[in-house]
Amino acid sequence: MNETEHDRRRDDIAAYLLGALEPGEAAELERHIAGCAECEEELRRLRPAVQVLPETVEKVEAPAALRIRLIEQVRSEAGSQAAPEVRGAPRWRFGLRPLAGFATVAILLAAIAGYAIRDSGSGGGGPKTTTVVSGHSPGVTAEMVREGETGTLRLANLHQLPAGKVLQAWVQRGKQVVSAKALFVPNPDGTATATIDGMDGVNTVMVTAEPRGGSAQPTGAPIVSVAIPQ
Amino acid sequence: MKIRASKAERLADEELMPRIGEKDPDAFEVFYDRHGGVAFSLAYRIVGERGAAEDVVQEAFISIWRSGARYDRARGSVRSWMLGIVRNRAIDFLRSKAGRAPKLDFDDDAALEHRPAAELTDAEALRRETTHELRGALGELPGEQSKVIELAYFGGFSHSEIAKMLDVPLGTVKGRMRLGLEKIRGELAGGLA
């Protein structure tokens, strides 16, 4: 291969690494590289320059709901009903689970230690189901009480938030995560309570730390995420 | 044999992949926690919509979950391999959107300013500064080189499409790509790697 031809190949290799060759051109180049040590070395040499490109993009926080959906799907496909074990705690059953903490908030871990579902019956004034999901860990204790359409989330052992931050509750229905319109801050003793209306169809209640005034979508990983039994 | 998440956290990516191939959800969870952030950032950079970026990342990670054993060490790090999958899925998404206008806005800060105020948090503002530093290798390139690289890698355009778009010969486009990658490679060799 003469020098001009080799220069053309080198240009092709750059375009190939960037995914800019047409499929036929890419296949032809791959065949060539398979028999050309010089071009193979060129490919190997330039590859890191392309591999660094995704690392240069503006960092955008991945939605917490995305992680939840992925892990739920993976565990479902794995045939496992169990959630991740956390520091020796028993496997959780109804989904009170820890996630990576918000960057400026101490990481709070919650591991389910027990749960109870109490069905108060449906007589009298219509359906009224009370569901309690609770758990504790060295980090935080959470309890979700549902009475009909209203849920009460009680948290304890919370760390105090940095200035300008509040806690915000979110509800997930299917894939959609929306604000529960509940902004709150921990009490001095580390407890906090949020009332969540419209629990119908909610499969997960989450709490994140958000800027004062709240956010339209979660901007960080949940401090706690409570799966609601259906 | 399943391993506990705490043990999986101590494994290197290359050691996690066989576990994922064995359908160990704990290993997958650790894998996602390590790389989900950059994967979402890349997908969002390419498709420009949070919902679409979520779909791209979800599809990419599920494909990895279902075919984790296909990772080949010879083709680079696990992270690069994963990001390649995300990038390809994101480009596929772009191409599936018929009539989509080319992404020609290279100013991410300008794009961010147009996002809803609620999305622009203090943490994001801090990350912007960090990203500016990380972006050095690409930012130092002459505009004509960074443009063809961005159009190809983040825009999913072929060299012939870019040539038409910029009204320059095909050889010029490929030459600029090579020169740009050469410079980035040089920067990496100089200590950014």
Image (cartoon, coloured by chain):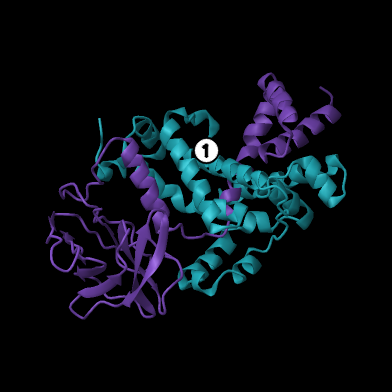
Q: Within 10 Å of the Cα at label 1, are there few (<14), some (14-19), or many (20+) other Cα atoms?
A: some
Q: Is residue A172 visible?
A: yes
Letter of the chain that mark 1 sits on in the rendering: B
Q: Nearer the viewer, residue A181 or B131?
A: A181
x and y, in percent, of residue B133 in the image: 57, 62
Tell me what residue is drawn at x 55 percent, y 71 percent. B116
Vertical placement of A63 versus A210: above or below?
above
Asked if one can make out residue B11 in the rendered structure from this viewpoint, the answer is: no
Give the colour of chain B: cyan
**Vertically, is B188 above or below B123?**
above
Left or right? Give the position of B139 relative to B175: left
Of residues A209 and A30, the one drawn nearer to the viewer in this rendering: A209
Q: Nearer the viewer, residue B85 or A148?
A: A148
Q: Which chain is purple?
A: A
The percent coordinates of residue B95 (x first, y second) are 67, 44
Q: Which residue is mark 1?
A: B81
Is A220 on the left or on the right of B51, as rendered?
left
What percent of the width, then of the height, locates residue B106? 69, 60
**Type of amino acid at the residue the image marks with label 1:** Trp
The part of the image, by quadrant, that contains residue B9 is top left
Give the residue at x 75% y 44%. B177
Q: Secondary structure at mark 1?
A: helix
Q: Residue at x 79, y 54 (%)?
A: B144
**Drawn side of residue A62 relative to residue B28, left or right:** right
**Where residue A79 sits in the image (x, y, percent)?**
28, 35
Task: Establish if A162 lies above or below A127.
Answer: below
